[in-house]
Image (cartoon, rainbow, N blue to C red):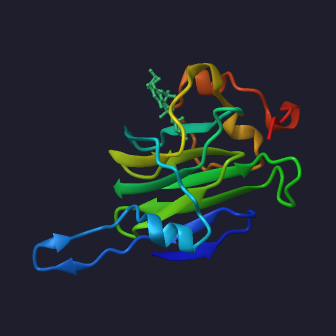
């Protein structure tokens, strides 16, 4: 695994090892010792994936304390533009966003620390977004901020987005608990 810093404090782009041979490809998505050596003490509690049509936007989601969590996100099928926002009030990069393409081809993952909102845009049909999460889902603490309030140009004319995601508060009206 190769870890690259991002403009947002503590968030990392992870290049997953992806050796190929005459049968195809093998991708390592989680390795506790390697993560710990990179300073990531990740207590895996839940894993799930979604499949999205092209131009679907999901986000920007997080769980509030005490059910806040970190995530490792990757895209084993198709491609997504993954987006995070730093919601930690004391962070030097509070309120800033970062976007990075994750795809079946580039084997990149994003390490998203606690205190970040997460979302993405599907760049392909049948884009799979695969999550490793450090706490279990808690419906009452599952919240979000509105995707189009974070200062990013999503570059999509007719995004497909859920009613819940459209109902979220804007970033500049949000009182961060982080
Ligand atoms: C997130 C989640 C949802 N659900 C349920 C609730 C609902 O019936 C259905 C779909 O939920 P959502 O609409 O929230 O799915 P989705 O919009 O794909 O939610 C995901 O979005 C991205 C951006 C993230 O960062 C993820 O952590 C997660 O919040 O699945 C669970 O049972 N467990 C979970 O952990």
Q: Which image quarter holds the N terminus?
A: bottom left
Q: Identify the residue shown where x is 45% and y is 64%.
A: 32
Q: In the shown orientation, is residue 153 left or right of residue 47?
A: right
Q: Position of residue 177 (x, y in %)?
A: 81, 35
Furthest residue toward left: 23
Q: Is residue 18 above or below residue 171?
A: below
**Dividing the picture into quarters, in which one does residue 93 lie?**
bottom right
Q: Identify the residue shown where x is 52% and y is 47%.
A: 121
**Dividing the picture into quarters, in which one does residue 76 lie?**
bottom left
Q: In the shown orientation, is residue 86 left or right of residue 36?
A: right
Q: Position of residue 108 (x, y in %)?
A: 46, 67
Q: Position of residue 92 (x, y in %)?
A: 87, 61
Q: Nearer the viewer, residue 73 or 149?
A: 73
Q: Is residue 166 above or below residue 30?
A: above
Q: In the shown orientation, is residue 135 left or right of residue 29?
A: right
Q: Nearer the viewer, residue 152 or 51?
A: 51
Q: Quick check: can you spot residue 60?
A: yes
Q: Position of residue 74 (x, y in %)?
A: 44, 56
Q: Nearer the viewer, residue 145 or 79?
A: 145
Q: Quick check: can you spot residue 153?
A: no
């Amino acid at each position: 695994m190769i870890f690259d810093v991002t403009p947002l404090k503590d968030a990392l782009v992870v290049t997953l090892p992806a050796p190929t041979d005459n049968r195809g490809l093998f991708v390592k998505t989680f390795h506790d010792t390697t993560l710990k050596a990179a300073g990531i003490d990740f207590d895996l509690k839940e894993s799930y994936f979604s499949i999205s049509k092209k131009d679907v936007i999901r986000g920007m989601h997080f769980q509030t304390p005490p059910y806040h969590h970190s995530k490792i996100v990757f895209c084993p099928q198709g491609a997504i533009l993954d987006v995070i926002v730093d919601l930690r009030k004391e962070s030097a990069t509070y309120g800033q966003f970062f976007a990075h393409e994750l795809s079946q081809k580039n084997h990149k993952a994003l390490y998203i620390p606690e205190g970040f909102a997460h979302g993405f845009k599907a760049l392909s049909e049948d884009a799979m977004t695969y999550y490793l999460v450090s706490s279990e889902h808690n419906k009452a603490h599952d919240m979000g901020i509105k995707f189009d309030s974070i200062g990013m140009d999503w570059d999509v004319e007719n995004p497909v987005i859920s009613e819940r995601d459209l109902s979220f508060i804007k970033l500049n009206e949000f009182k961060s608990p982080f």
